[in-house]
Amino acid sequence: MKFPEFDSPTLAELREWWHKHPDTDVRSLILEVQSHRLELLETRELFDEGFRQLAAEHGAITAAGTPLSKARVRLAIEIRRAGEIDDTPKRPPAVVDFQKMGSHGTPSRN
């Protein structure tokens, strides 16, 4: 199926529509769009990591113009087209003090 050219709604626009349109069907569509955008980001992260691993071991598979390379570019284009997808503040990873941990990853009882 070929779609006509259109501007993808921004995250701000989706939020505005959410507050403006309480209709369940409209809100379901907004949730569907945002859900797929977040999945697209996660897929890109996984794909990029796999791509890097393959490139290190089998460079020819990831060369420009190969199906994997084209898929990577396609993911990047779709993410760029969507604009900002997730503005959730990122929390730094938790710091673990391994000296205070017991043998099974639980705090010791000292």
Image: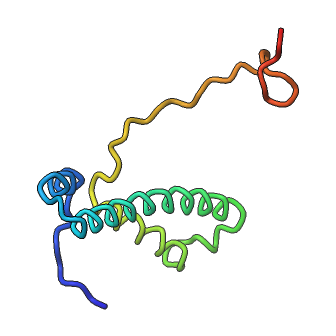
* Residue at image coords 45%, 61%: 39
Residue 27 picture location, percent across and down: 25, 62
Could you tell me residue 70's position as x and y percent?
46, 75
Question: Where does the N terminus fall, quadrant-wise?
Answer: bottom left
Count of numbered circles on the image: 0
In this view, the residue in front, 109 or 41, is 109
Whether residue 32 sits left or right of residue 53 in the image: it is left
Residue at the spot x=43%, y=63% of the render?
Answer: 40
Q: Residue furthest top?
A: 110
Q: Residue at the far bottom: name it.
A: 1
Image x and y of residue 64, in percent:
50, 72
Q: Quadrant of residue 78?
A: bottom left
Q: Quadrant of the C terminus?
A: top right
Colouring scheme, one of rainbow, by chain, secondary structure, one colour: rainbow
Residue 12 in the image: above or below residue 76: above
Residue 38 found in image quarter: bottom left
Report whether 89 appears left or right of 9. right
Above or below 103: residue 75: below
Q: Residue at x 56, y 59 (%)?
A: 46
Residue 63 horizontal/vertical position (percent): 56, 71
Q: Residue at x 62, y 61 (%)?
A: 50
